[in-house]
Amino acid sequence: MPNKTNTKSAELYERAKRVMPGGNTRTTVFRTPHQFYAQRGDGCRITDVDGNVRIDAVGNFTALIHGYGNKRILDAARSQIEVGPCYGMSTESEIRLSELLCERLPSVEQLRYTNSGTEAVMNAIKAARAYTGRSKIAKCEGAYHGTYDPAEVSQDAGPSTWGDIEKPKSVPTAKGTPQGVLDDIVVIPFNNVTVAEKILRAEGHALAAVLVDVMPNRAGLVPARPDFLAMLRRVTREFGALLILDEVITFRLGYNGAQGRFDADPDFTTLGKVIGGGFPIGAIGGRAEVMSVFDPSKGAPAVPHGGTFSANPMSMMCGIAAVEELTPEAFEKLENLGHRFEHGVRQLFQMHGVDGQVTGIGSLRRVHMTNAPLSDYRSTFAAAEGPQRVAALARALFDEGVMIAGNGLMAFSTPMRKDDIDEILSGFDRALKTVAAH
Ligand SMILES: Cc1ncc(COP(=O)(O)O)c(C=O)c1O
């Protein structure tokens, strides 16, 4: 449990404020009164610059599925850096990682790499537009797909901006988002088959694609209903639009990704996070026919896609090691860790008389401090002062030596054992006491 002061983190933050706006270069890790600065990671533990050790139950926002110091990933990184971190040439490693991913993902025949999930989604959107010759993209309200401006629309909508559920408004996230971007985004309510289908049918002939995450974190980390996914597939096919499945987070749900688990059949899949073994990565995959928009071998491609660090061999080599380490046994272990946590934390909510529930599946979980049923972004948002209470719980957990995301998101990793889950649960036990007292 952390028992030291945060002097060094506070000092570093003072320095940071002089050279970075708000002392911050990544909003996701911003905290008040100051950010915390990491020193090192070991297995599933992270140590900050003041020597506080915490159990890392979110793994750089779900990216570090093998935690810190995985031997195969370390060996891959060391051997690659010895011979060059990147080149202005292709490497065999990009072929090997593609072979591995194509073998696992039923809908993916070919892939291309980017440096982040944001870029993967951006290229999937551009590819869908190029393939269909249409401009509109439908996405679910509240879903996060990275920071490309069309993908960001309505991710932070609120009651004063979101409009009628029968026709959710396109709400900008960044100030200055052009009206043209908003006009091209069709917002649908997640898991609401009737309303979403009506909206999609009204826009059908203008739609290039529907972009969907089968378990969107910000919209509650609630799994998509099978009839919702089936409707998206049916309607997109009927209108000649494409279905983009964003698996940047959810690929970690199973050996065949979320598409295997949810029996989804997308045209494009976007990947990121775990497939880079801790190094920056993103990928766009799909059937050869739709991926041909990127093909430069027959003249200028419909969608030119480069990138100085795209498919850099550090990310490729570490990604190969990370994906190969994701064996069926590793997934079974992660699944069991998720169950143990879910069962334990439910008991704790009851024991402390605190409203609360856990959503998500497998190694991907989110804690909510409400008993109200959650099905989509609006129901998650509406959970009274739930989000503030979850943020308070996350802060209390941090003080008790457990690191989760501020919205309650958690991701378990392969170095964790049952004992580590029990340690997380005892952190919850202590943190819930603090939260219940307020
Ligand atoms: C579902 C989803 N898509 C895309 C992204 C963007 O990925 P990146 O942060 O690598 O740009 C994220 C990031 O959290 C995500 O959760």
Image (cartoon, helix red, strand yellow):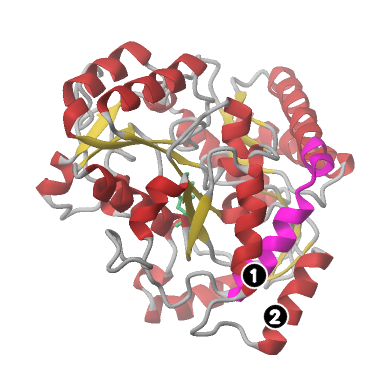
324 in relation to 427, above or below: below
Whether residue 366 appears in this view of the structure is no
Start and end of the magenta stretch?
Answer: 313-332
Q: CA distance from mark 2 to mark 1?
A: 10 Å
Magenta: main secondary structure: helix
Residue at 22% across / 16% down in the picture?
A: 166
* Image disc number at residue 93: 1
Q: Which residue is mark 2?
A: 80
At numbered mark 1, what does the secondary structure look like: helix, strand or loop? helix
Q: Amino acid at mark 2?
A: Gln
Give the side of residue 105 with respect to residue 214, left or right: right
* Residue 83 horizontal/vertical position (percent): 68, 88
Determine the image quadrant of residue 71.
bottom right
Q: Secondary structure at mark 2?
A: helix
Residue 156 is tagged as none
Q: Is residue 364 above or below residue 100?
A: above
Asked whether residue 430 is in view, the answer is: yes
Q: Quadrant of the C terminus?
A: top right
